[in-house]
Image (tube, rainbow, N blue to C red):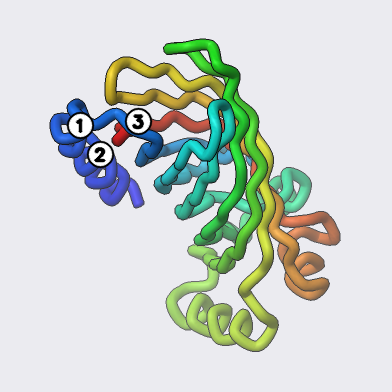
Amino acid sequence: MKRAFPRVLLFVLCLAPAAAFAQGNSAIEGFGGLSLNSFSAQSPSAGGTLSYNVVPGVQIIGEAGRIGNVLPTMADTIFTVARTDVSASAWYGEGGVRFIAPTGSVAPYGEATAGISRIDVHSDAFGPIGNAATEIALGFVGRNAPVAGVGGGVLLRSGPVVFDLGYRYKQLFANDIMQAALGLGQPLRTHQVRFGIGVRF
Protein backbone atom coordinates (compact mmCIF):
# COMPACT_ATOMS: atom_id res chain seq x y z
CA MET A 1 0.00 0.00 0.00
CA LYS A 2 2.92 2.38 0.64
CA ARG A 3 3.93 1.87 -3.00
CA ALA A 4 0.38 2.08 -4.31
CA PHE A 5 -0.48 5.47 -2.79
CA PRO A 6 2.24 7.44 -4.66
CA ARG A 7 0.91 5.94 -7.90
CA VAL A 8 -2.63 7.10 -7.09
CA LEU A 9 -1.30 10.55 -6.22
CA LEU A 10 0.72 10.73 -9.46
CA PHE A 11 -2.35 9.70 -11.46
CA VAL A 12 -4.42 12.48 -9.86
CA LEU A 13 -1.70 15.05 -10.52
CA CYS A 14 -1.42 13.98 -14.16
CA LEU A 15 -5.12 14.73 -14.58
CA ALA A 16 -4.69 18.33 -13.44
CA PRO A 17 -3.67 19.91 -16.78
CA ALA A 18 -6.62 18.37 -18.60
CA ALA A 19 -9.00 19.37 -15.85
CA ALA A 20 -7.77 22.96 -15.72
CA PHE A 21 -10.02 23.83 -18.63
CA ALA A 22 -13.04 21.98 -17.32
CA GLN A 23 -13.78 22.84 -13.72
CA GLY A 24 -17.22 21.30 -13.52
CA ASN A 25 -19.45 19.59 -11.00
CA SER A 26 -17.27 16.53 -10.36
CA ALA A 27 -13.97 15.86 -8.62
CA ILE A 28 -11.64 12.89 -8.18
CA GLU A 29 -9.31 12.66 -5.20
CA GLY A 30 -6.60 10.36 -3.90
CA PHE A 31 -6.00 10.34 -0.15
CA GLY A 32 -3.78 8.91 2.51
CA GLY A 33 -4.13 8.93 6.25
CA LEU A 34 -3.44 7.36 9.61
CA SER A 35 -5.67 5.14 11.75
CA LEU A 36 -5.25 6.39 15.30
CA ASN A 37 -6.62 3.35 17.17
CA SER A 38 -3.24 2.36 18.55
CA PHE A 39 -1.14 4.23 21.12
CA SER A 40 2.06 2.45 20.05
CA ALA A 41 1.97 2.87 16.27
CA GLN A 42 -0.17 4.43 13.57
CA SER A 43 -1.45 2.38 10.65
CA PRO A 44 -1.57 4.00 7.19
CA SER A 45 -4.78 4.07 5.16
CA ALA A 46 -5.26 5.02 1.51
CA GLY A 47 -7.94 5.26 -1.14
CA GLY A 48 -9.81 7.44 -3.58
CA THR A 49 -13.00 9.50 -3.67
CA LEU A 50 -15.25 10.57 -6.53
CA SER A 51 -17.74 13.39 -5.87
CA TYR A 52 -20.53 15.05 -7.84
CA ASN A 53 -22.39 18.28 -6.99
CA VAL A 54 -26.14 17.63 -7.15
CA VAL A 55 -27.06 21.11 -5.92
CA PRO A 56 -24.87 23.91 -4.51
CA GLY A 57 -23.46 22.76 -1.19
CA VAL A 58 -24.52 19.09 -1.56
CA GLN A 59 -22.44 16.32 -3.14
CA ILE A 60 -22.95 12.63 -3.78
CA ILE A 61 -19.70 10.79 -3.05
CA GLY A 62 -18.28 7.35 -3.75
CA GLU A 63 -15.19 6.11 -1.95
CA ALA A 64 -13.01 3.00 -1.98
CA GLY A 65 -9.83 2.15 -0.14
CA ARG A 66 -8.05 0.31 2.64
CA ILE A 67 -8.32 0.98 6.37
CA GLY A 68 -5.01 0.19 8.03
CA ASN A 69 -6.35 -0.76 11.47
CA VAL A 70 -9.90 -1.63 12.56
CA LEU A 71 -9.09 -3.00 16.04
CA PRO A 72 -10.65 -0.97 18.86
CA THR A 73 -8.09 0.65 21.17
CA MET A 74 -8.52 -1.81 24.07
CA ALA A 75 -8.15 -4.90 21.88
CA ASP A 76 -5.22 -3.39 20.01
CA THR A 77 -3.46 -2.63 23.30
CA ILE A 78 -4.07 -6.13 24.71
CA PHE A 79 -2.80 -7.81 21.52
CA THR A 80 0.29 -5.58 21.60
CA VAL A 81 1.08 -6.28 25.28
CA ALA A 82 0.55 -10.02 24.70
CA ARG A 83 2.99 -9.86 21.74
CA THR A 84 0.57 -11.61 19.40
CA ASP A 85 1.28 -9.10 16.60
CA VAL A 86 -2.34 -9.48 15.51
CA SER A 87 -3.49 -6.79 13.08
CA ALA A 88 -6.82 -6.36 11.34
CA SER A 89 -7.32 -4.19 8.27
CA ALA A 90 -10.18 -3.86 5.81
CA TRP A 91 -10.84 -3.08 2.16
CA TYR A 92 -14.06 -1.13 1.68
CA GLY A 93 -16.35 0.65 -0.75
CA GLU A 94 -18.91 3.27 0.28
CA GLY A 95 -21.38 5.79 -1.06
CA GLY A 96 -22.87 8.77 0.70
CA VAL A 97 -23.57 12.48 0.87
CA ARG A 98 -21.38 15.47 1.70
CA PHE A 99 -22.55 18.93 2.79
CA ILE A 100 -20.18 21.80 1.97
CA ALA A 101 -20.36 25.34 3.30
CA PRO A 102 -20.51 27.77 0.33
CA THR A 103 -17.51 29.81 1.46
CA GLY A 104 -15.39 29.92 -1.69
CA SER A 105 -11.82 28.63 -1.77
CA VAL A 106 -11.82 27.46 1.89
CA ALA A 107 -14.88 25.29 2.45
CA PRO A 108 -15.67 23.30 5.64
CA TYR A 109 -17.71 20.13 5.09
CA GLY A 110 -19.38 17.20 6.82
CA GLU A 111 -20.31 13.83 5.35
CA ALA A 112 -21.97 10.47 6.02
CA THR A 113 -21.31 7.23 4.12
CA ALA A 114 -22.28 3.54 4.13
CA GLY A 115 -21.12 0.47 2.23
CA ILE A 116 -19.43 -2.92 2.51
CA SER A 117 -16.01 -4.02 3.80
CA ARG A 118 -13.81 -7.11 3.68
CA ILE A 119 -11.74 -7.81 6.80
CA ASP A 120 -8.15 -9.12 6.68
CA VAL A 121 -6.35 -10.50 9.75
CA HIS A 122 -2.58 -11.04 9.96
CA SER A 123 0.08 -11.80 12.54
CA ASP A 124 3.84 -12.16 12.21
CA ALA A 125 3.68 -14.55 15.17
CA PHE A 126 1.46 -17.02 13.26
CA GLY A 127 3.90 -17.63 10.44
CA PRO A 128 2.84 -18.43 6.85
CA ILE A 129 0.91 -21.58 7.79
CA GLY A 130 -0.90 -19.85 10.66
CA ASN A 131 -1.90 -16.92 8.48
CA ALA A 132 -3.15 -19.28 5.77
CA ALA A 133 -5.23 -21.14 8.36
CA THR A 134 -6.59 -17.80 9.60
CA GLU A 135 -7.68 -16.90 6.06
CA ILE A 136 -9.50 -20.24 5.74
CA ALA A 137 -11.20 -19.77 9.13
CA LEU A 138 -12.31 -16.27 8.18
CA GLY A 139 -13.93 -17.72 5.09
CA PHE A 140 -16.15 -19.90 7.28
CA VAL A 141 -16.85 -17.23 9.91
CA GLY A 142 -17.63 -14.49 7.39
CA ARG A 143 -15.20 -11.69 6.66
CA ASN A 144 -17.56 -9.31 4.84
CA ALA A 145 -19.30 -6.67 6.98
CA PRO A 146 -21.37 -3.54 6.42
CA VAL A 147 -19.48 -0.32 7.15
CA ALA A 148 -20.69 3.18 7.95
CA GLY A 149 -18.78 6.39 8.42
CA VAL A 150 -19.08 10.03 9.38
CA GLY A 151 -16.53 12.78 9.18
CA GLY A 152 -15.66 16.31 8.33
CA GLY A 153 -12.86 18.61 7.34
CA VAL A 154 -12.00 21.46 5.08
CA LEU A 155 -11.54 21.69 1.30
CA LEU A 156 -8.94 24.11 -0.04
CA ARG A 157 -9.77 24.88 -3.68
CA SER A 158 -7.42 26.65 -6.07
CA GLY A 159 -8.48 26.51 -9.71
CA PRO A 160 -8.95 22.88 -10.69
CA VAL A 161 -6.92 21.54 -7.74
CA VAL A 162 -8.58 20.52 -4.47
CA PHE A 163 -6.80 19.81 -1.17
CA ASP A 164 -8.69 17.93 1.53
CA LEU A 165 -7.75 17.84 5.23
CA GLY A 166 -10.15 15.94 7.45
CA TYR A 167 -11.17 13.34 10.01
CA ARG A 168 -13.19 10.13 9.55
CA TYR A 169 -14.82 7.69 11.95
CA LYS A 170 -15.72 4.34 10.38
CA GLN A 171 -17.41 1.37 12.06
CA LEU A 172 -17.63 -2.16 10.72
CA PHE A 173 -20.74 -4.12 11.66
CA ALA A 174 -19.04 -7.51 11.85
CA ASN A 175 -20.81 -10.66 13.03
CA ASP A 176 -20.71 -11.63 16.72
CA ILE A 177 -17.89 -14.16 16.30
CA MET A 178 -15.61 -11.71 14.50
CA GLN A 179 -16.42 -8.93 16.95
CA ALA A 180 -15.72 -11.16 19.95
CA ALA A 181 -12.46 -12.58 18.55
CA LEU A 182 -10.96 -9.35 17.21
CA GLY A 183 -12.74 -6.59 19.10
CA LEU A 184 -13.01 -8.47 22.41
CA GLY A 185 -16.69 -7.54 22.42
CA GLN A 186 -16.27 -4.01 21.07
CA PRO A 187 -17.13 -2.93 17.50
CA LEU A 188 -14.39 -2.96 14.89
CA ARG A 189 -13.76 0.68 14.04
CA THR A 190 -11.22 3.32 13.17
CA HIS A 191 -10.47 6.97 13.82
CA GLN A 192 -8.60 8.47 10.88
CA VAL A 193 -6.89 11.72 10.05
CA ARG A 194 -6.32 12.10 6.34
CA PHE A 195 -4.97 14.32 3.63
CA GLY A 196 -6.09 14.23 0.01
CA ILE A 197 -5.42 15.97 -3.28
CA GLY A 198 -7.61 15.93 -6.34
CA VAL A 199 -8.89 17.75 -9.40
CA ARG A 200 -12.26 19.12 -10.45
CA PHE A 201 -13.63 18.39 -13.90
Q: Nearer the viewer, mark 3 or mark 1?
A: 1
Q: Where is residue 58 shown, x and y percent of the image?
A: 58, 33
User: Which amino acid lies under the numbered mark 1 shown in the image of this protein?
Assistant: Ala
Q: Nearer the viewer, residue 55 or 167?
A: 55
63 sits to left or right of 196: right
User: Which residue lies under the disc numbered 2?
Assistant: 12
User: Which amino acid lies under the numbered mark 2 shown in the image of this protein?
Assistant: Val
Q: Residues within 10 Å of mark 1 (few under 14, many from 20)?
A: some
Q: Quadrant of residue 40?
A: top right
Q: Quadrant of residue 133?
A: bottom right
Pointers 3 and 2 in contact (C-beta within 8 Å): yes
Tell me which residue sits at (20%, 26%) in the image: 20
Q: Is residue 113 above or below residue 177?
A: above
User: Which amino acid lies under the numbered mark 3 shown in the image of this protein?
Assistant: Ile
Report helix, strand or loop for mark 1. Answer: helix
Tell me which residue sits at (57%, 79%) in the image: 134
Residue 40 in sight in this render: no
Q: Where is residue 159 shown, x and y percent of the image?
A: 28, 18
Tell me which residue sits at (31%, 45%) in the image: 5
Pointers 2 and 1 in contact (C-beta within 8 Å): yes
Q: Is residue 9 above or below residue 185?
A: above
Mark 3 or mark 1: whose residue is earlier in sequence: 1
User: Which residue lies under the disc numbered 1?
Assistant: 16
Report helix, strand or loop for mark 2. Answer: helix
How far apart are labels 3 and 1 at the CA level? 10 Å
65 sits to left or right of 70: left
How far apart are labels 3 and 2 at the CA level? 8 Å
Q: Nearer the viewer, residue 193 or 18?
A: 18
Q: Nearer the viewer, residue 39 or 14?
A: 14
User: Which residue lies under the disc numbered 3?
Assistant: 197
